[in-house]
Amino acid sequence: MPTTVHRQCNLCEAHCGIAVEVQGTKVLRITGDPEDHFSRGYICPKAAALTDLYEDPDRVTTPLRKTADGGWEPLGWDEALDAAAAGLRRVREQHGADAIANYLGNPGAHSWSVLAFLTLRLVLGTRNNYSATSTDQLPQHLTSAEMLGTPLVFPIPDLERTDHLLVLGANPAVSNGSVMSAPGVRDRLRAVKARGGTVIVVDPRRTETARLADEHVAVRPGGDPYLLLGVIGVLFAEGLVAVGRLAEHVDGVEELRALTAAWTPQRAAEHSGVDADTIVRLARGFAAAPSAVAYGRVGVCQTQTGTVTHWLITALNTLTGNLDRPGGAMFTTPPVDPTPLLQLVGKTGFRLHRTRTARVSGLPNMNGEFPIAGLADEITTPGDGQVRGLVVYAGNPVLSAPGGAALDAALPQLDFMVAIDQYVTETTRHADIILPPVSALERDDLDFVMPAVSVRNHVRFSPAAVPKRPGGREDWQIINGLSRRLGTGLRRRGVAGAVHAATLLKLDSPARILDLALAMGPYGVLRRGPLKGLTVARVRAAEHGIDLGPLEPRLPGMLTTPGRRVQLAPELFVEEARRLDAQAREQGEATADGFDLTLIGRRSLRSNNSWLHNSRRLMKGADRCVALLHPDDAQARGLSDGALVRVSSRVGAIDLPVQVSDELRPGVVSIPHGFGHGREGVGWTHAAAKPGVSVNDITDPTVLDRLTGNAAYNSVAVRVEAVPVDAAAAADDAALAAGGR
Ligand SMILES: Nc1nc2c(c(=O)[nH]1)N[C@H]1C(S)=C(S)[C@@H](COP(=O)(O)OP(=O)(O)OC[C@H]3O[C@@H](n4cnc5c(=O)[nH]c(N)nc54)[C@H](O)[C@@H]3O)O[C@H]1N2
Ligand SMILES: Nc1nc2c(c(=O)[nH]1)N[C@H]1C(S)=C(S)[C@@H](COP(=O)(O)OP(=O)(O)OC[C@H]3O[C@@H](n4cnc5c(=O)[nH]c(N)nc54)[C@H](O)[C@@H]3O)O[C@H]1N2
Ligand code: SF4
Ligand SMILES: [Mo]
């Protein structure tokens, strides 16, 4: 008899509720769960791909060991975990704890097993921790740390109530919302307009979101901080600043007034590429709206001014009285409080350490991690502390990190590498041991990350939809197995760290850690209120999730700054803002090498970073790994639609088809990331047949957000030219040989 299991899709941050119809081990159908409290039936085309991932014959289902001739041999779990632990221990014994680096990829945020990984970090005791955070939201962590006192909370647009949404550098109609979980976001944007509100999108490309909006502002890449300085300058000049309820709890208004005084709309226009009238209009419209919220995501994080931009976004919200007010930028009250949870699993020291720098790159440490941009050099540069071992969990940095080609070249130099992943990817192909977890549909989960960044408070348990295949293990079981084996000889955090790790390993399942965290949280047994007493069992019993209500005002109580005050003008940011002028002059001008265009990224609704390209149903249709270029730029280079072009930067070149499109601002070229599956030994057969190229072969690991070291993929200067005919013919032959494109 078929049965239906209700759980969530864990592919992107929307975490939609799904109904999975199953019969035994067979998945019959995946649909949206109309009774889900949060997503109310919405799903996107990717949800069906959960079945493809589950059934994929290319998925690794047994531990693998690299053989002498570069092939793979299957191993039993005990043998594999013993070998993995022995290899890592050897590196540690010969070269010390810091010689083992680890990388935590994006799907880590979509599974409770990440808790086990943090325990593994405790056991490894290395300073060389890396993650996808430094390709993504690191500027938002630093902004929150400096302005609110903790890097672990983010202002979230109150989409359900706002009258005015200003989006900078996000494309939620495609990404489905990020650091703003909002399943069915297109409908939520339409609803803002339907109730008389306004949606404005600031983006160098007229995106899917821009097309839904009232207005599209085609900013120059990296132009946002100037635009915002101009907008804030207008607010001060026209007496439109009104902090409102929080006025008594905000420091730095006068510093911002002084700082923005020089940024007249004309001057801001010159550097942002947005005309002065528009800047004035944006400021007035934002201030006049009954409620308004500015929201920025990776489009602005991934620039050299990522942190400064996010600071100015929060400043704009605050100066107009929209921080922490309904319809503005609010804070969640998630069932699991991130700070105590992370302390529970041994993670402390949440801040930017500008003096605790990476050995080779000199990049700063934040939240206990170094930026991924520096990892390749740590591996290839000899000396004390050189990285010689690596654990990669749920990540594909060869395709995702800036300068991924250099990392691809560096990984073979490691003495030993372990990967925890379901596929032989561009990254894991370099591993000595691959430890494959079961797929998402085969495991239980309780999502504690996305409720912390959702547009509504909620919580949901996800039961496994199908039984694990015989011998299948979940990530946390694998990781704890590794931690236990490493237990002796690897800890260097003294007795306290050892006891801590041992206690966590005794708790074993993330469910037990989360029971503790829920008890400590705002709905836990220790609190008063109608929802008191939330436990994993109670969440599990609620088949369609539990609604915990709209976002509620939380300031000043939640602030952890001195005196519980919002810091509008942190010294670190003000200093950086003063440097913006010089930077503006550097940017946008052709460099001596003739890199005269700026590269930006692009996401597709039918893809997710690097790892859904093996799904036939998602890969149907036209080739998506194409470079978009404005008609004027194409014409100036003699390029017509479909031509093969070479896009080069300081660090490399890639060849791909061009698509001429007036969606783009002139001077910009847009290329998606996550392709480049043609590398030797990649285990994704369908993906490898339509390989595309990796844009991160040309992104520059030295072009980073100045304050955090976050990848600045959208600040890379490139050149685009026709591929010489001989090379184009050779590329065609290669494509034909690989099965055609
Ligand atoms: N379908 C799908 N959904 C996804 C993902 C996916 O790969 N596919 N990935 C997931 C992940 S890991 C994340 S982090 C989120 C990201 O979610 P979003 O932040 O919404 O990501 P993008 O779609 O990349 O949107 C970034 C936008 O910024 C624009 N942009 C580039 N440079 C600039 C600039 O200098 N200024 C401004 N104002 N705009 C700029 C780009 O043109 C692009 O439209 O999406 C998640 N969801
Ligand atoms: N040029 C450019 N580069 C970018 C971006 C961009 O906008 N432009 N975006 C950046 C962003 S925002 C992000 S978040 C990063 C993502 O960067 P990464 O996290 O490094 O890369 P992913 O492509 O998400 O790879 C995820 C890997 O995890 C595996 N996996 C999936 N589910 C599981 C699981 O449950 N358990 C385990 N063990 N493994 C699993 C997949 O097989 C895949 O190999 O990419 C960044 N790179
Ligand atoms: S938007 Fe799509 S991929 Fe994201 S959680 Fe919902 S169904 Fe899954
Ligand atoms: Mo991301």
Image (tube, rainbow, N blue to C red):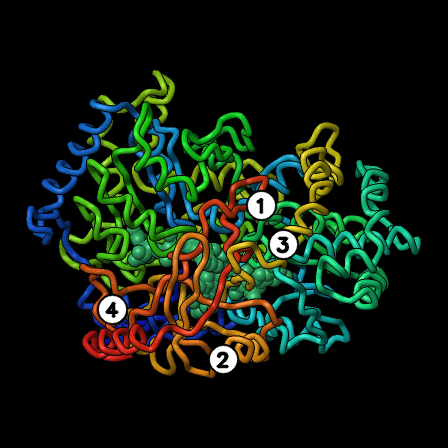
Is the residue marked by circle 2 packed among few (<14), some (14-19), or many (20+) residues within 10 Å? few
- Kind of residue indicated by mark 1: Pro
- Looking at the picture, how far across and down is residue 126, in whole percent? 35, 28
Q: Quadrant of residue 663?
A: bottom right
Q: Tag 3: residue type?
A: Gln
Q: With respect to residue 22, does 587 lie above or below?
A: above
Query: In this view of the protein, which residue sits in the foreground, 176 or 536?
Result: 176
**Which labelled disc corresponds to residue 139?**
1
The CB of the residue at mark 3 lies under 8 Å from ligand 1:
no
The residue pinned by badge 4 equals 688
Residue at (36, 38) in percent of width and height: 377
Nearer-the-camera pick, 18 or 127: 127
Q: Which mark lies nearer to you, 4 or 1?
A: 4
Label 3 and label 4: CA atoms lie apart by 36 Å
In the shown orientation, is residue 419 left or right of residue 303? left
Q: Is residue 153 left or right of residue 370?
A: right
Question: Of callouts 2 and 1, which one flags the residue occurring earlier in the amino acid sequence?
Answer: 1
CA separation in Å, label 4 and label 1: 34 Å
In what element is the residue under mark 4?
A: helix
Name the residue that disc number 2 marks: 638
- Tell me where residue 605 appears, x and y as whole percent: 46, 72
Foreground label between 3 and 2: 2
